[in-house]
Image (cartoon, rainbow, N blue to C red):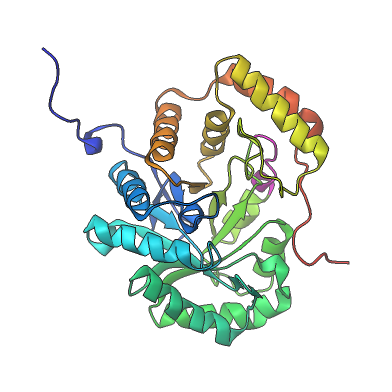
Amino acid sequence: MMNTYPTDPKKEHKMELRELGRTGLKLSSVGFGASPLGNVFGSVSEQQANASVRLAFQSGINFFDTSPYYGSTLSEKVLGKALKALNVPRSEYIVATKCGRYEDGFDFSAERVTRSIEESLERLQLDYVDILQCHDIEFGSLDQIVNETIPALQKLKEAGKTRFIGITGLPLGVFTYVLDRVPPGTLDVILSYCHHSINDSTLEDIVPYLKSKGVGIISASPLAMGLLTEAGPPEWHPASPELKSACKAAATYCKEKGKNISKLALQYSLLNKEITSVLVGMRSVEQVEENVAAAREVAASGIDEEALSEVGAILKPVKNQTWPSGIQES
Protein backbone atom coordinates (compact mmCIF):
# COMPACT_ATOMS: atom_id res chain seq x y z
CA MET A 1 0.00 0.00 0.00
CA MET A 2 1.29 3.47 -0.83
CA ASN A 3 2.28 5.80 1.95
CA THR A 4 -0.13 8.70 1.57
CA TYR A 5 0.53 10.67 4.73
CA PRO A 6 3.14 13.46 4.41
CA THR A 7 6.61 12.71 5.74
CA ASP A 8 7.65 14.72 8.76
CA PRO A 9 10.89 16.55 7.83
CA LYS A 10 11.92 16.34 11.51
CA LYS A 11 12.02 12.53 11.27
CA GLU A 12 14.39 12.51 8.31
CA HIS A 13 18.16 12.60 8.68
CA LYS A 14 18.57 15.84 10.62
CA MET A 15 21.07 18.49 9.70
CA GLU A 16 24.32 18.06 11.61
CA LEU A 17 24.90 20.64 14.37
CA ARG A 18 28.42 21.81 15.20
CA GLU A 19 29.70 23.89 18.11
CA LEU A 20 30.87 27.41 17.34
CA GLY A 21 34.19 27.99 19.09
CA ARG A 22 33.61 28.67 22.80
CA THR A 23 30.21 30.31 22.38
CA GLY A 24 28.13 27.28 23.33
CA LEU A 25 26.06 27.91 20.18
CA LYS A 26 25.36 24.89 17.99
CA LEU A 27 24.96 25.87 14.34
CA SER A 28 23.65 23.75 11.49
CA SER A 29 26.52 22.62 9.26
CA VAL A 30 24.78 24.43 6.39
CA GLY A 31 23.83 28.04 7.15
CA PHE A 32 21.24 30.12 5.30
CA GLY A 33 22.96 33.02 3.54
CA ALA A 34 20.27 35.68 3.24
CA SER A 35 21.98 38.08 0.81
CA PRO A 36 19.77 36.81 -2.08
CA LEU A 37 16.70 37.92 -0.08
CA GLY A 38 17.93 41.46 -0.76
CA ASN A 39 17.29 40.88 -4.49
CA VAL A 40 21.02 40.97 -5.21
CA PHE A 41 20.73 38.07 -7.70
CA GLY A 42 17.29 38.93 -9.11
CA SER A 43 13.99 39.67 -7.43
CA VAL A 44 12.58 37.37 -4.75
CA SER A 45 8.94 37.72 -3.70
CA GLU A 46 8.00 37.87 -0.03
CA GLN A 47 6.13 34.59 -0.46
CA GLN A 48 9.22 32.94 -1.98
CA ALA A 49 11.44 34.30 0.81
CA ASN A 50 9.09 33.10 3.55
CA ALA A 51 8.75 29.64 1.97
CA SER A 52 12.54 29.29 1.61
CA VAL A 53 13.23 30.29 5.22
CA ARG A 54 10.43 28.04 6.49
CA LEU A 55 11.65 24.99 4.57
CA ALA A 56 15.25 25.64 5.67
CA PHE A 57 14.16 25.82 9.31
CA GLN A 58 11.99 22.69 9.03
CA SER A 59 14.93 20.87 7.42
CA GLY A 60 17.19 21.58 10.39
CA ILE A 61 18.96 24.77 9.26
CA ASN A 62 19.02 26.98 12.37
CA PHE A 63 21.59 29.61 11.33
CA PHE A 64 20.62 32.68 9.26
CA ASP A 65 23.18 35.30 8.19
CA THR A 66 22.50 38.77 6.80
CA SER A 67 23.90 42.32 6.67
CA PRO A 68 22.55 45.86 6.23
CA TYR A 69 24.71 45.98 3.10
CA TYR A 70 22.78 43.22 1.29
CA GLY A 71 20.21 44.83 -0.97
CA SER A 72 20.74 48.12 0.95
CA THR A 73 18.91 46.85 4.08
CA LEU A 74 16.29 44.82 2.17
CA SER A 75 17.79 41.43 3.14
CA GLU A 76 17.44 42.22 6.86
CA LYS A 77 13.81 43.35 6.47
CA VAL A 78 12.80 40.31 4.40
CA LEU A 79 14.62 37.87 6.69
CA GLY A 80 13.04 39.51 9.75
CA LYS A 81 9.54 39.02 8.33
CA ALA A 82 10.27 35.43 7.32
CA LEU A 83 11.62 34.50 10.76
CA LYS A 84 8.66 36.14 12.45
CA ALA A 85 6.31 34.13 10.22
CA LEU A 86 7.86 30.89 11.54
CA ASN A 87 6.10 31.61 14.82
CA VAL A 88 8.61 29.60 16.88
CA PRO A 89 10.49 30.56 20.07
CA ARG A 90 13.38 32.98 19.44
CA SER A 91 15.82 30.50 20.98
CA GLU A 92 15.25 28.03 18.13
CA TYR A 93 17.18 29.99 15.51
CA ILE A 94 20.50 31.81 15.39
CA VAL A 95 20.77 35.15 13.59
CA ALA A 96 23.96 36.90 12.54
CA THR A 97 24.17 40.36 11.03
CA LYS A 98 26.99 42.77 10.34
CA CYS A 99 28.00 46.41 10.69
CA GLY A 100 30.47 48.80 9.11
CA ARG A 101 29.58 48.22 5.45
CA TYR A 102 26.61 50.01 3.93
CA GLU A 103 25.25 50.90 0.51
CA ASP A 104 26.99 54.27 0.74
CA GLY A 105 30.36 52.87 1.82
CA PHE A 106 32.29 51.84 4.91
CA ASP A 107 32.10 53.36 8.39
CA PHE A 108 33.68 51.45 11.27
CA SER A 109 33.41 54.31 13.80
CA ALA A 110 32.08 53.43 17.25
CA GLU A 111 29.21 55.87 16.76
CA ARG A 112 28.12 54.31 13.44
CA VAL A 113 28.30 50.66 14.48
CA THR A 114 26.39 51.43 17.69
CA ARG A 115 23.61 53.06 15.68
CA SER A 116 23.83 50.28 13.11
CA ILE A 117 22.76 47.48 15.45
CA GLU A 118 19.69 49.45 16.60
CA GLU A 119 18.67 49.89 12.95
CA SER A 120 19.32 46.20 12.21
CA LEU A 121 17.28 45.01 15.20
CA GLU A 122 14.37 47.15 14.07
CA ARG A 123 14.51 45.72 10.53
CA LEU A 124 14.91 42.16 11.81
CA GLN A 125 12.12 42.70 14.39
CA LEU A 126 14.37 41.23 17.08
CA ASP A 127 15.49 42.28 20.56
CA TYR A 128 19.01 40.94 20.00
CA VAL A 129 21.12 39.14 17.41
CA ASP A 130 23.25 36.13 18.27
CA ILE A 131 26.30 37.31 16.34
CA LEU A 132 27.31 40.83 15.24
CA GLN A 133 30.31 41.10 12.95
CA CYS A 134 32.37 43.93 11.45
CA HIS A 135 31.79 43.51 7.72
CA ASP A 136 34.78 43.22 5.34
CA ILE A 137 37.32 44.85 7.60
CA GLU A 138 40.03 44.96 4.91
CA PHE A 139 38.25 48.06 3.56
CA GLY A 140 38.88 49.98 6.78
CA SER A 141 41.83 50.80 8.99
CA LEU A 142 42.65 47.60 10.86
CA ASP A 143 44.00 49.68 13.74
CA GLN A 144 40.65 51.47 13.99
CA ILE A 145 38.96 48.04 14.01
CA VAL A 146 41.21 46.97 16.92
CA ASN A 147 41.11 50.20 18.95
CA GLU A 148 37.65 51.60 18.27
CA THR A 149 35.24 49.23 16.51
CA ILE A 150 35.78 46.07 18.55
CA PRO A 151 35.55 47.90 21.93
CA ALA A 152 32.24 49.39 20.69
CA LEU A 153 31.01 45.88 19.80
CA GLN A 154 32.05 44.64 23.25
CA LYS A 155 29.83 47.32 24.79
CA LEU A 156 26.92 46.19 22.60
CA LYS A 157 27.54 42.65 23.80
CA GLU A 158 27.47 43.83 27.44
CA ALA A 159 24.24 45.72 26.70
CA GLY A 160 22.62 42.51 25.37
CA LYS A 161 22.17 43.79 21.80
CA THR A 162 24.27 40.88 20.57
CA ARG A 163 25.38 37.69 22.28
CA PHE A 164 28.67 37.31 20.40
CA ILE A 165 30.93 39.41 18.18
CA GLY A 166 33.23 38.79 15.24
CA ILE A 167 34.89 40.03 12.06
CA THR A 168 34.59 39.14 8.37
CA GLY A 169 36.85 39.62 5.37
CA LEU A 170 38.45 38.06 2.31
CA PRO A 171 42.25 38.25 2.91
CA LEU A 172 43.08 35.75 5.66
CA GLY A 173 45.80 38.04 6.99
CA VAL A 174 43.22 40.45 8.42
CA PHE A 175 42.13 37.81 10.95
CA THR A 176 45.61 37.16 12.31
CA TYR A 177 46.40 40.91 12.33
CA VAL A 178 43.39 41.69 14.52
CA LEU A 179 43.43 38.58 16.72
CA ASP A 180 47.10 39.18 17.58
CA ARG A 181 46.20 42.67 18.82
CA VAL A 182 43.08 42.15 20.94
CA PRO A 183 42.98 40.49 24.37
CA PRO A 184 42.29 36.74 24.31
CA GLY A 185 38.58 35.96 24.30
CA THR A 186 37.63 39.37 22.85
CA LEU A 187 36.33 37.99 19.56
CA ASP A 188 34.04 34.97 19.41
CA VAL A 189 33.92 34.21 15.71
CA ILE A 190 35.38 34.94 12.28
CA LEU A 191 33.58 34.64 8.95
CA SER A 192 35.80 33.85 5.96
CA TYR A 193 34.61 33.44 2.39
CA CYS A 194 35.98 31.90 -0.82
CA HIS A 195 38.88 30.25 1.06
CA HIS A 196 37.34 26.90 1.84
CA SER A 197 36.28 25.46 -1.48
CA ILE A 198 37.63 22.95 -3.99
CA ASN A 199 39.70 25.62 -5.76
CA ASP A 200 41.01 27.35 -2.62
CA SER A 201 41.45 25.63 0.74
CA THR A 202 43.79 28.17 2.38
CA LEU A 203 41.41 28.73 5.31
CA GLU A 204 42.48 25.30 6.56
CA ASP A 205 46.03 26.62 7.03
CA ILE A 206 44.92 29.01 9.78
CA VAL A 207 42.38 26.71 11.51
CA PRO A 208 44.91 25.65 14.22
CA TYR A 209 45.72 29.33 14.86
CA LEU A 210 42.03 30.29 15.09
CA LYS A 211 41.35 27.40 17.44
CA SER A 212 44.28 28.47 19.63
CA LYS A 213 42.58 31.88 19.88
CA GLY A 214 39.29 30.21 20.88
CA VAL A 215 37.50 31.62 17.86
CA GLY A 216 34.62 29.87 16.06
CA ILE A 217 34.90 29.58 12.28
CA ILE A 218 32.19 30.18 9.69
CA SER A 219 32.94 29.81 6.00
CA ALA A 220 30.85 31.38 3.27
CA SER A 221 30.62 30.98 -0.49
CA PRO A 222 31.54 27.31 -1.02
CA LEU A 223 30.75 27.91 -4.71
CA ALA A 224 33.42 30.66 -4.83
CA MET A 225 30.88 33.39 -5.71
CA GLY A 226 29.61 31.44 -8.72
CA LEU A 227 32.90 30.04 -10.08
CA LEU A 228 31.87 26.51 -9.12
CA THR A 229 28.49 26.50 -10.87
CA GLU A 230 27.27 25.35 -14.27
CA ALA A 231 26.09 28.88 -15.09
CA GLY A 232 29.49 30.34 -14.22
CA PRO A 233 30.36 33.50 -12.28
CA PRO A 234 28.71 36.92 -12.70
CA GLU A 235 30.33 39.46 -15.06
CA TRP A 236 31.88 41.41 -12.19
CA HIS A 237 33.65 38.41 -10.63
CA PRO A 238 37.21 39.48 -9.67
CA ALA A 239 38.89 36.13 -10.46
CA SER A 240 41.60 35.97 -13.15
CA PRO A 241 40.66 34.68 -16.64
CA GLU A 242 42.85 31.62 -15.91
CA LEU A 243 40.91 30.77 -12.73
CA LYS A 244 37.54 31.33 -14.43
CA SER A 245 38.53 29.11 -17.32
CA ALA A 246 39.74 26.26 -15.05
CA CYS A 247 36.51 26.37 -13.02
CA LYS A 248 34.48 26.33 -16.23
CA ALA A 249 36.40 23.23 -17.37
CA ALA A 250 35.70 21.56 -14.00
CA ALA A 251 31.97 22.37 -14.27
CA THR A 252 31.88 20.98 -17.83
CA TYR A 253 33.64 17.77 -16.74
CA CYS A 254 31.04 17.26 -13.99
CA LYS A 255 28.14 17.91 -16.35
CA GLU A 256 29.48 15.43 -18.92
CA LYS A 257 29.69 12.80 -16.16
CA GLY A 258 26.10 13.51 -15.05
CA LYS A 259 27.30 15.21 -11.84
CA ASN A 260 26.86 18.72 -10.50
CA ILE A 261 29.88 20.88 -9.65
CA SER A 262 27.90 22.97 -7.12
CA LYS A 263 26.77 19.94 -5.16
CA LEU A 264 30.31 18.54 -5.12
CA ALA A 265 31.67 21.93 -4.02
CA LEU A 266 29.21 22.24 -1.13
CA GLN A 267 29.90 18.68 0.00
CA TYR A 268 33.66 19.29 -0.08
CA SER A 269 33.20 22.37 2.13
CA LEU A 270 31.23 20.33 4.66
CA LEU A 271 33.97 17.72 5.12
CA ASN A 272 36.10 19.74 7.56
CA LYS A 273 34.25 19.61 10.89
CA GLU A 274 36.53 22.25 12.44
CA ILE A 275 34.55 24.71 10.32
CA THR A 276 31.27 25.12 12.14
CA SER A 277 28.93 26.23 9.40
CA VAL A 278 29.12 26.69 5.64
CA LEU A 279 26.97 29.62 4.51
CA VAL A 280 25.19 29.25 1.20
CA GLY A 281 23.05 31.95 -0.36
CA MET A 282 19.50 30.70 -0.89
CA ARG A 283 16.56 32.38 -2.57
CA SER A 284 14.14 29.58 -3.46
CA VAL A 285 12.61 26.41 -2.08
CA GLU A 286 14.44 24.47 -4.83
CA GLN A 287 17.83 25.80 -3.70
CA VAL A 288 17.06 24.94 -0.08
CA GLU A 289 16.05 21.41 -1.13
CA GLU A 290 19.24 20.93 -3.17
CA ASN A 291 21.52 22.17 -0.37
CA VAL A 292 19.79 20.13 2.33
CA ALA A 293 19.89 16.98 0.16
CA ALA A 294 23.60 17.49 -0.58
CA ALA A 295 24.37 17.92 3.13
CA ARG A 296 22.35 14.86 4.14
CA GLU A 297 23.96 12.75 1.42
CA VAL A 298 27.54 13.64 2.39
CA ALA A 299 26.74 13.03 6.08
CA ALA A 300 25.23 9.62 5.31
CA SER A 301 27.54 8.26 2.61
CA GLY A 302 30.50 10.60 2.12
CA ILE A 303 31.64 12.42 -0.99
CA ASP A 304 32.10 11.19 -4.57
CA GLU A 305 35.87 10.66 -4.31
CA GLU A 306 36.36 9.99 -8.02
CA ALA A 307 34.68 13.23 -9.10
CA LEU A 308 36.53 15.16 -6.38
CA SER A 309 39.89 13.85 -7.53
CA GLU A 310 39.17 14.59 -11.21
CA VAL A 311 37.97 18.12 -10.43
CA GLY A 312 40.98 18.59 -8.14
CA ALA A 313 43.28 17.65 -11.03
CA ILE A 314 41.57 20.14 -13.39
CA LEU A 315 41.90 22.92 -10.81
CA LYS A 316 45.45 22.06 -9.72
CA PRO A 317 47.17 24.77 -11.87
CA VAL A 318 45.04 27.49 -10.21
CA LYS A 319 44.78 25.95 -6.72
CA ASN A 320 44.62 28.59 -3.97
CA GLN A 321 44.72 31.45 -6.47
CA THR A 322 42.74 34.36 -5.02
CA TRP A 323 42.14 38.02 -5.90
CA PRO A 324 42.83 41.35 -4.16
CA SER A 325 40.22 42.83 -1.84
CA GLY A 326 40.24 45.96 0.28
CA ILE A 327 42.76 48.70 0.82
CA GLN A 328 45.94 47.09 -0.46
CA GLU A 329 48.63 47.15 2.22
CA SER A 330 51.72 48.62 0.57
Q: Residue at x 68, y 73 (%)?
A: 181
Residue 251 coordinates in the image, percent (x, y): 65, 26
* Res. 24 visible in picture: no
Looking at this view, name the residue that lies furthest to the left.
1
Q: Is residue 176 left or right of residue 270?
A: right
**Residue 201 among those drawn in magenta:** yes
In this view, the residue in front, 67 or 130, is 67
Q: Residue at x 61, y 33 (%)?
A: 231
The residue range painted magenta reads 198-205
Looking at this view, name the residue that lies furthest to the right.
330
**Residue 33 among those drawn in magenta:** no
Q: Is residue 157 left or right of residue 152?
A: left
Residue 267 coordinates in the image, percent (x, y): 52, 32
Q: Is residue 177 above or below residue 210?
A: below
In this view, the residue in front, 198 or 79, is 79
Residue 250 coordinates in the image, percent (x, y): 68, 25
Q: Is residue 191 above or below residue 48?
A: below
Q: Is residue 299 above or below residue 40?
A: above
